[in-house]
Amino acid sequence: MNVNEVISNCAIEILGGKLGTKNPVHPNDHVNKSPSSNDTYSCNAYCYAIPLTLEQGFSAYLQQIDNAIVRVENSLPRVYKLAAGGIAVKIGLNTHKALAAHDSMVEAHGALYVIAAFLTKYALFLPENEPGSSIMPGNVYPTQCEALTIAAQISGNQVAVTVGGLNGHFELNVFKPMMVRNVLQSIQLLADESRSFAEHCVLGIDANRGHIEKLFRKSLMIIKLTEQKFTIFHLKILM
């Protein structure tokens, strides 16, 4: 709706009207008359404007992995700091706030959750790579991709760790064992499945060159790739 109002005001200004009056161009009656932005944005938001190479696509995935490694490494210095000791009468006397606050574990698990999220996204874009069912022709079980449903478990662990981090009454957090258990489980799940996914699915990926060439030849967007070259050529002629 905000976009419609911006467009409406721009049109009003061009036509010499007063901003905010919705006259002569109304954001609903005119700008949003047909079609609604709700009908177009959700689809077009995921369409590429110009053709992308495989290198460009995979480089984006690689950058996500690099960023994930940095996030985990950046959270470790705060995880290394352990609060030792305890309190007797629970009045907070001579105690350190780290006995109640476990923000470092919430932060570290957040980094793990990000990894689980983008690994699942990778799997959704990969085709089947296994022979499939022996009794149902054409039915293929992409087990390596399906194994990344561990993201659901890690998502649940994220909620549990976050709830644990919310507590810490009387300067003592009794949720710490639960938080530690969930963090360790997420680490183990990600480590095991990442190795398996890389070894049995990602390693050896090859381009379907015939299909790529077919799509490339049918795409009108290749004009964008040559537009700049033609513009430079025309400028040279004019000069």
Image (cartoon, rainbow, N blue to C red):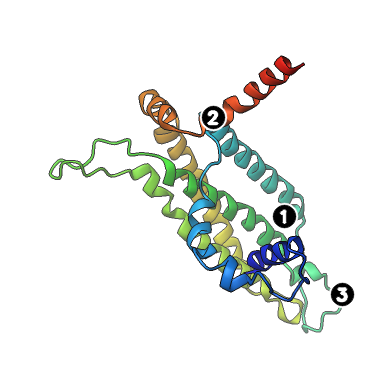
Instruction: Return the residue found at the far front.
Output: 16
Q: Closer to the camera, 180 or 204?
A: 204
Disc 2 to disc 3, how far (Cα)? 71 Å
Image point (63%, 70%), residue name: 27
Image point (63%, 72%), residue name: 26
Task: Report the amino acid beneath label 3.
Answer: Asn
Q: Which mark is residue 79?
A: 1
Question: Badge 1, how many Cα within 10 Å: few under 14, some, many 20+?
Answer: some
Q: Which mark is residue 69?
A: none
Disc 3 to disc 1, how far (Cα)? 22 Å
Question: Badge 2, how many Cα within 10 Å: few under 14, some, many 20+?
Answer: few
The N terminus: image quadrant: bottom right
Nearer mark to the viewer, of 1 and 2 = 2
Q: Is residue 156 above or below residue 238?
A: below
Q: Quadrant of residue 60?
A: top right
Could you tell me residue 193's position as x and y percent?
Answer: 46, 44
Taking the image as drawn, is residue 101 in sight?
Answer: yes
Q: Which mark is residue 94?
A: 3
**Side (left or right) of 233 relative to 199:** right
Q: Is residue 155 above or below residue 197?
A: below
Question: Badge 3, how many Cα within 10 Å: few under 14, some, many 20+?
Answer: few
Sequence-first disc among 2 and 3: 3
Could you tell me residue 89's position as x and y percent?
Answer: 78, 84
Nearer mark to the viewer, of 3 and 1 = 1
Task: Report the amino acid beneath label 2.
Answer: Ile
Q: Secondary structure at mark 1?
A: helix
Sequence-first disc among 1 and 2: 1
Identify the residue under disc 2: 223
Sequence-first disc among 3 and 1: 1
Mark 1 and 2 residues: CB-CB less than 8 Å, in contact? no
Disc 1 to disc 2, how far (Cα)? 52 Å
